[in-house]
Image: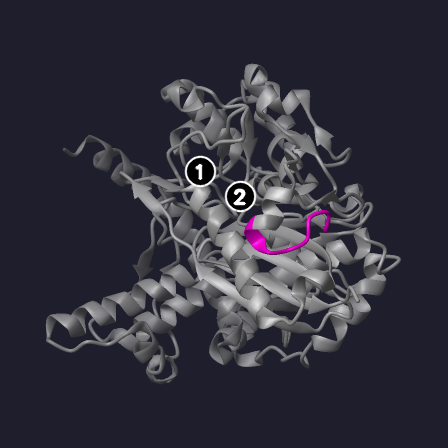
Amino acid sequence: MRDILIGIDAGTSVIKSVAFDTAGRQIAAAAVPNSYETIGRTGAVQDLDRTWADAARTLRDLSQKVENLASRVVGIAVTGQGDGTWLIDKQGLPVGKGWLWLDARAGDTVAELRTRQGDAERFRHTGAGLAACQQGSQLRWMCDHAPEYLTGAATAFHCKDWLYFNLTGKRATDPSEANFTFGNFRERTYSDTVIGFLGLEKQRFLLPEIVDGATTHHPLSEAAADLTGLIAGTPVVLGYVDVVCTSLGAGIYDPGTDTGCSIVGSTGMHMRLAKGADDVLLNDDRTGYTMCMPIPGIYAQMQSNMAATLNIDWILAVAGGLLKSMGVEKSKSDLLVHMEDWLSDAKERPPIFHPYISEAGERGPFVDASARASFIGLNISSGFPDMVRAVFDGLALAARDCYLAMGPLPDRVRLTGGAARSASLRRILGGALGASVQTSEREEAGAAGAAMIAAVSLGLYGSMAECVKQWVTPYQRPAEPADAGLVKHFDTVFPAYRQSREALQPVWRTLHNEQDILP
């Protein structure tokens, strides 16, 4: 009996395969830690062969947890981290290592392209602002500064596309990534205007076919079957990019409601649903993303903070480093136990923190590869708890900044990602947005969203709305209303947050230029 769907989610930190029954109940999961390496100050790459080997391992490990898995699988769906550039040759072998979304080498390229008059038309087509993390920007940088990186390349993939190729032998990408990078979101096709603006006409051959997993699938190859232990011919679905799948699994698609979705993990993704191309609101600063959803005529608008919980990791590392210098060893888990105490000990009016801790700068709601984190308003009485609280407030203020770039603040936000487990963060975020916050009992929203696309594609449900009723709605916890006191606090603080981050932009650029000339 074929009664299981597998969702593969290849994230930045972990690669996992999750088994669900056809009604959406999670049965088992297998995961392998992911790793990448940095190059210089701004490069970040990942080994393609190891990524595929790790993904295949999770499928084999899953077989050890689910009896007769291979014979029970209805279909497999794959999603993964977005942006980046993963090149292969005509034989399907990697050309170098995959550039990640964390790679900021194209920062200056983006800054120059954004000054050109044609960027407004490019933005109208894609609905997405240029950023150093995107494949188009990275390919342009390679052409200008390191053309040898492209020698022998035949196809440019993203992470999930590479895994799909290894599973099926099909060179393809999905409508979400194809269109916000190179396409026209209204038509869901590649755009000559966009490719021409990026100066990539001669590299167009690298762009694979756009395949919509919501309607199309391909069979698992013999080679992939031998490596994973699954059965050749099993349908494989190319999911949309991970943020689309995660938002789908978390409940962004809820017809008749004014619901946003925030994914607070290593990065922060803040999304609103557009119920048609005319409902897409393009901002004057030309930032954010417009992503096709696996539903006809439906789009997700997104503004993305480059770093979210990475800021929390940083402040914990500061504490851990200080303790270590005094001969006291504390793990991240040990320090997390004290987080609630630090938050409760903080002053009611903590400093302002700009959460731009990533070396890659920021991409939402503004694009600046030189952006860096900062505290504003420290004084002699400021203590470590105040800094911890400022970091949490900074994440919430950055979320508000992002939502306002897409229109009015939503009435309710569906929250997912690792930080959704923090009651304090949920309360602070709700206050900053003036919205109720709702989380899901489902932890693997990304893998679930990919599996939902497969469930509709393979005809197990007549529509995504039907699938949502069984896969999403029953798992929603009661909404937590916004704290009126926090709403008032953030209404007062936000103007200073916004004013100070705008004032600091020339300072970031000066610091960035000085670093470039240091030996």
Residue 50 lies, in percent from the top left, at 43, 46
Residue 75 lies, in percent from the top left, at 73, 55
Q: Which residues are magenta?
A: 227-234
Q: Nearer the viewer, residue 295 or 390?
A: 295
Counting every numbered tag in the picture gives 2
Give the SS element for disc 2: helix
- Quick one: label 2 or label 1, which is nearer the N terminus? 1
Give the SS element for disc 1: strand
Q: Is residue 350 left or right of residue 415?
A: left
Residue 213 lies, in percent from the top left, at 74, 45
Q: Are marks 2 and 1 in contact (CB under 8 Å)?
A: yes
User: Is residue 418 at least partly visible in the picture?
Assistant: yes
User: Is residue 443 at least partly visible in the picture?
Assistant: no
Amino acid at the residue labelled 2: Cys
Query: Dot 2 surroundings within 10 Å: few (below 14), some, or many (20 or more)?
Result: many
Q: In the rendered image of this protein, does residue 34 appear above or below residue 437? A: above
Q: Which residue is mark 2?
A: 159
Q: In the rendered image of this protein, does residue 487 appear above or below residue 77? A: below
Q: Which residue is mark 1?
A: 98
Q: Nearer the viewer, residue 332 or 287?
A: 332
Q: Is residue 264 magenta?
A: no
Chief SS of the magenta region: loop
Q: In the rendered image of this protein, does residue 100 appear above or below residue 30? A: above
